[in-house]
Image: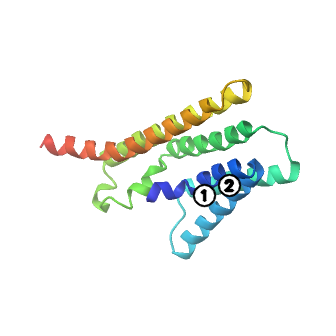
Amino acid sequence: MGILFGFLPFIGFALVDRLIGPTEGLIAGAAISIFILLRERMAGKTPKLLELGTAILFVCLAVYAVLLTPSWSLWTFRLLVDAGLLLIVLVSMAIGRPFTLQYARESVEPQFWGTPEFLRTNYIISAVWGLAFAAMVAADALLVFAPSLPQKVGIVVTILALVSAMKFTAWYPARDKSASTSSH
């Protein structure tokens, strides 16, 4: 469940946004993010970069939306959320701690954590997620600046991007392991 748990605030945002509205979606995303941070803290765990970045993103956007009640379109809200998510991924990679690293350590033996292959695999998987989020940002921006386009464009791009990143995340480490064992 690992990495998918980190995306719960975004799922909550999307559901509440669709059912009630974007400001309420941001509040839901913030509440779920805070709950996750508290849950991790109570379990004695250090929050993951994705969880911490997500909480900051949703709390800031929710406070802004509540206090200033912007007249943004649904796609503008989604653009900000998806761009924030992309930024979290890019910053995690730039500081040398790709966001998938913390999740991978939960399922990989500690003796592999310091290997170049482990780090490379996490950079590659994080980059694929970054590409998925970049595609979502591009689709959101397209719908913000060309509102006459069918909203299905954003929905289809989002689904394809996320499913592709999830499938790659499941496939790549196994492929990497089989490639390294077949060469010995």
| Direction from residue 61 to residue 96 in the image, left or right | left
> Is 63 placed left or right of 100 in the picture?
right
For the C terminus, give its image quadrant: top left
Q: CA distance from mark 1 to mark 2?
A: 6 Å
* Residue 132 shown left or right of residue 114 in the figure: right
Residue at horizontal 57 percent and vertical 56 percent from the top: 8
Q: Residue furthest left?
A: 184
Q: Which residue is mark 1?
A: 52
Rendered view: 154 above or below 11: above
Toward the viewer: 98 or 68? Answer: 68
Image location of residue 14, percent across then percent down: 64, 49
Q: Quadrant of the N terminus?
A: bottom left
Q: Secondary structure at mark 1?
A: helix
In percent of width and height, residue 101 lies at 43, 52
Where is residue 31, by image quadrant? bottom right
- Residue picked out by circle 2: 56
Q: Residue at x 59, y 52 (%)?
A: 11
- Verify CB contact (< 8 Å) between mark 1 and mark 2: yes
Q: Which mark is residue 108?
A: none
Compared to 146, does 79 lie above or below? below
Amino acid at circle 1:
Leu
The three-letter code of the residue at mark 2 reads: Ile
Q: Is residue 46 above or below residue 164?
A: below
Does the image show residue 39? yes
Q: Nearer the viewer, residue 123 or 80?
A: 80
Nearest the viewer among 19 and 36 is 19
